[in-house]
């Protein structure tokens, strides 16, 4: 945390480009509950479940912060660290969803 406080956020466009080049899907959600507005960044990749042979999502990073730039920066850092270790956050997020429809344009 000390290094992050000293360096601050990288540029938003650089962070988004890194995430976009690394995973197939990026979600930036904005929501407000009883408190301040929060931003949630979810980076996930479309892959194939080796057991069932069906398409599935693997979530590599999930971060929530009060401002979008910090959430994107922390998601990029988490994505980079999890890729190095090979440890995703979640696998097969929605088993009953037809993932094929999400990839057709």
Image (cartoon, rainbow, N blue to C red):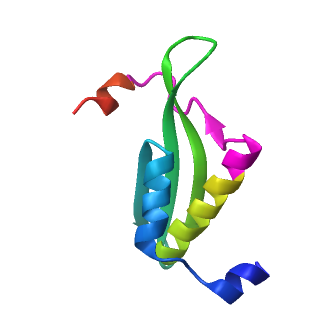
Which residue occupies the foreground of this view, 31 or 93? 93
Q: Is residue 88 left or right of residue 14?
A: right
Residue 86 showing in the rendered view:
yes
Above or below — where is 22 with respect to 73?
Answer: above
Q: Is residue 90 magenta?
A: yes
Which residue occupies the foreground of this view, 34 or 90? 90
* Residue occupying the point 45% across, 50% down: 21
Where in the figure is residue 7, as x and y percent of width and height? 65, 85
Which residue occupies the foreground of this view, 98 or 23? 23
Magenta portion: prevailing SS class: loop
Q: Is residue 3 left or right of residue 90?
A: right
* Residue occupying the point 69% across, 80% down: 4
Q: Which residues are magenta?
A: 82-98
* Residue occupying the point 42% across, 66% down: 31
Which residue occupies the foreground of this view, 64 or 81? 81
Above or below — where is 104 with respect to 59?
Answer: above
Where in the figure is residue 26, as x and y percent of width and height? 43, 51
Quadrant housing residue 70: bottom right
Residue 32 showing in the rendered view:
no
- Quadrant containing the N terminus is bottom right
Above or below — where is 62 with respect to 39?
Answer: above
Quadrant housing residue 2: bottom right
Q: Is residue 91 magenta?
A: yes
Where in the figure is residue 60, as x and y percent of width and height? 60, 46
User: Residue at the bottom extreme?
Assistant: 6
User: Residue at the left extreme?
Assistant: 105
* Residue occupying the point 50% across, 38% down: 45
Where in the figure is residue 25, as x and y percent of width and height? 42, 44
């Amino acid at each position: 945390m000390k290094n992050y406080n000293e360096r601050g956020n990288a540029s938003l466009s650089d962070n988004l480009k890194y995430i976009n080049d690394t995973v197939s899907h990026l979600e930036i959600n904005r929501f407000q509950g009883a408190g301040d507005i929060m931003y949630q960044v979810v980076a996930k990749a479309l892959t194939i479940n080796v057991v069932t042979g069906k398409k599935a999502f693997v979530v590599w990073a999930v971060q929530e912060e009060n401002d979008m730039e910090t959430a994107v920066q922390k998601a990029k850092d988490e994505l980079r660290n999890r890729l190095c270790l090979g440890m995703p956050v979640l696998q097969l997020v929605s088993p009953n969803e037809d993932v094929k429809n999400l990839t057709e344009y």
